[in-house]
């Protein structure tokens, strides 16, 4: 492949070593891919998916059998009562916002137990002022930080014994923080605790980047509502947009009425041609997630060998597809992002630079050459330009193209060091 890549000898040697050393770790990923592929196929079988389901509706979207069948497939995969999988959800953030507005009423209390939620939710909740926030409607909010990369069980117990909490949010993936992502085992433990104190609290999980990374999903361990984006794991690069919410029927019905309108809920919403890519994306998702995981594992191994602090380490258990790399200096992080961009199928010829970005205090550099705008199941990497220069890298639709992206990026750093 070096006919096309022009990699330094040092890059190739390190790559060959990594591929040899990672066989066992990759084998573990293959086993999860196999399990999840059978889980997804089983859902297609039990929902009797056929070519009819690729047809779509326009206008109101009444009687969209494909859309309804897709929701039945999601319900089966997540082992739960109900699902909403819609192209009317613009993004993961929009799906989360509609979920909050569907579940909460004036005077209710929302509690986050995984620290401050994802940046785009600050104005939704009212952590930052907005005339349209939950807070502006009189919905209260509190948060409890994680403690040593786990839930603060004691504080959570005290808080819910002393306050009437309506919804608890758990965000599994790390967002732009340096904490570890939250495994299913930890979710299970905390949900058991919450339910043992107050069975009426709705536990809602932001599952972005975590779908199909392990063999269980939060709904398997007691979560009431689970939310995610289709331009991440479950869309597998094929879904053109959208989001999903799965969980208990009473809650999903409320969220449907928040997405569309009271009285019509999930009965309306045309699929507008998305049924086939939604189904095909889901079919590919276990394999694409495995590719993204292997891409992150390879990056983790090689960058650690080059002396950078990485998280997770190559042989750590993973809860999501994200790899964080602490570069420690601006030049390395920029070189790395430029390398990722140059290895992308789309926009390989442009060179990313750090720019001011709405919602962020520092400049941010983003490398993304994706088939779908903003898709981060495609190989992508972004980094706020501030100490200690941490990059967040994720995705890789195929492991072969993902590792070529990683090699181009690492080669940029090696070339810079050698000059
Ligand atoms: C990506 C992400 C979101 C938001 O998804 P978008 O589709 O980008 O709006 C929310 N929460 C977490 C943890 C994420 O990683």
Image (spheres, grey):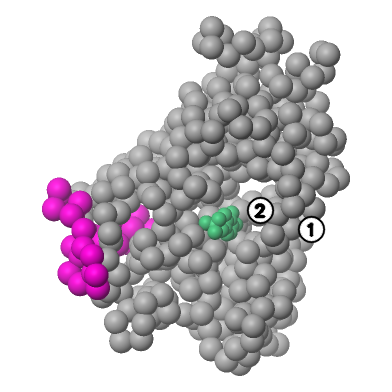
Return the residue nearer the eye: 287 or 51.
51
Q: Residue at x 66, y 54 (%)?
A: 175
Query: Residue 207 placed where, x, y %?
Result: 52, 58
Residue 62 magenta: yes
Query: Residue 148 placed where, x, y %?
Result: 77, 56
Residue 416 in sight from this viewpoint: yes
In the rendered view, does 41 fall on the left or right side of 301? left
In the rendered view, does 207 fall on the left or right side of 52? right
Q: Is the residue indicated by label 1 positioned so its CB lies within 8 Å of ligand 1?
A: no
Tell me the crowding category of disc 1: few under 14, some 14 to 19, or many 20 or more residues within 10 angstroms, Cα based: few
Q: Is the residue indicated by label 2 positioned so its CB lies within 8 Å of ligand 1?
A: yes
Tell me the crowding category of disc 2: few under 14, some 14 to 19, or many 20 or more residues within 10 angstroms, Cα based: many
Which mark is on residue 174?
2
Give me the C-alpha separation between circle 2 and circle 1.
18 Å
The span picked out in magenta is 50-78
Residue 250 in sight from this viewpoint: no
Ligand 1 placement by image quarter = bottom right
Query: Residue 118 placed where, x, y %?
Result: 65, 62
Q: Residue at x 31, y 47 (%)?
A: 277
User: Which of pointers 2 and 1 lies earlier in the amino acid sequence?
Assistant: 2
Which mark is on residue 195?
none
Return the residue nearer the eye: 92 or 356.
356
Q: Which residue is mark 1?
A: 361
Relative vertical location of residue 84 with respect to residue 392 in this rendering, above or below: below
């Amino acid at each position: 492949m070096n006919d096309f890549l022009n990699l330094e000898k040092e890059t190739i040697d390190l790559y060959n070593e990594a591929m040899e050393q990672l066989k066992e770790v990759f084998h573990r990923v293959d086993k999860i891919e196999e399990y999840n592929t059978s889980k997804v196929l089983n859902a297609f079988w039990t929902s009797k998916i056929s070519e009819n389901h690729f047809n779509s509706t326009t206008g109101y979207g009444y009687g969209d059998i494909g859309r309804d069948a897709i929701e039945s497939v999601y319900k089966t995969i997540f082992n739960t009562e109900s699902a909403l999988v819609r192209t009317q959800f613009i993004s993961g953030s929009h799906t989360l916002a509609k979920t909050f507005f569907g579940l909460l009423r004036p005077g209710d209390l929302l509690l986050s137990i995984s620290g401050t939620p994802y940046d785009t939710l600050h104005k939704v909740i009212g952590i930052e002022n907005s005339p349209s926030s939950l807070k502006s409607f009189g919905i209260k909010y509190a948060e409890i930080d994680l403690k040593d990369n786990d839930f603060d069980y004691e504080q959570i117990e005290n808080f819910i014994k002393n306050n009437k909490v309506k919804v608890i949010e758990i965000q599994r993936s790390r967002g732009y923080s340096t904490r570890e992502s939250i495994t299913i085992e930890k979710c299970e433990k905390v949900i058991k605790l919450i339910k043992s104190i107050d069975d009426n609290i709705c536990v809602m999980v932001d599952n972005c980047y975590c779908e199909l990374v392990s063999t269980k999903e939060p709904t398997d361990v007691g979560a009431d509502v689970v939310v995610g984006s289709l331009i991440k794991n479950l869309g597998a690069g094929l879904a053109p947009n959208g989001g999903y919410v799965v969980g208990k029927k009473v809650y999903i019905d409320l969220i449907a009425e928040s997405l569309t309108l009271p009285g019509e809920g999930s009965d309306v919403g045309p699929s507008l041609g998305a049924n086939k890519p939604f189904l095909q994306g889901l079919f590919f998702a276990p394999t694409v997630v495995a590719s993204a995981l292997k891409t992150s594992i390879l990056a983790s191994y090689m960058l650690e060998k080059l002396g950078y602090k990485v998280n997770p380490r190559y042989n750590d258990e993973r809860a999501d597809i994200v790899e964080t790399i602490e570069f420690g200096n601006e030049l390395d992080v920029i070189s790395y992002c430029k390398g990722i961009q140059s290895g992308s199928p789309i926009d390989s010829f442009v060179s990313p630079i750090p720019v001011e970005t709405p919602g962020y205090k520092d400049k941010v550099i983003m490398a993304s050459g994706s088939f779908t705008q903003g898709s981060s199941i495609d190989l992508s990497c972004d980094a706020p330009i501030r100490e200690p220069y941490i990059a967040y890298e994720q995705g890789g639709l195929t492991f072969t193209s993902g590792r070529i992206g990683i090699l181009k990026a690492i080669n940029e750093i090696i070339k810079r060091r050698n000059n």
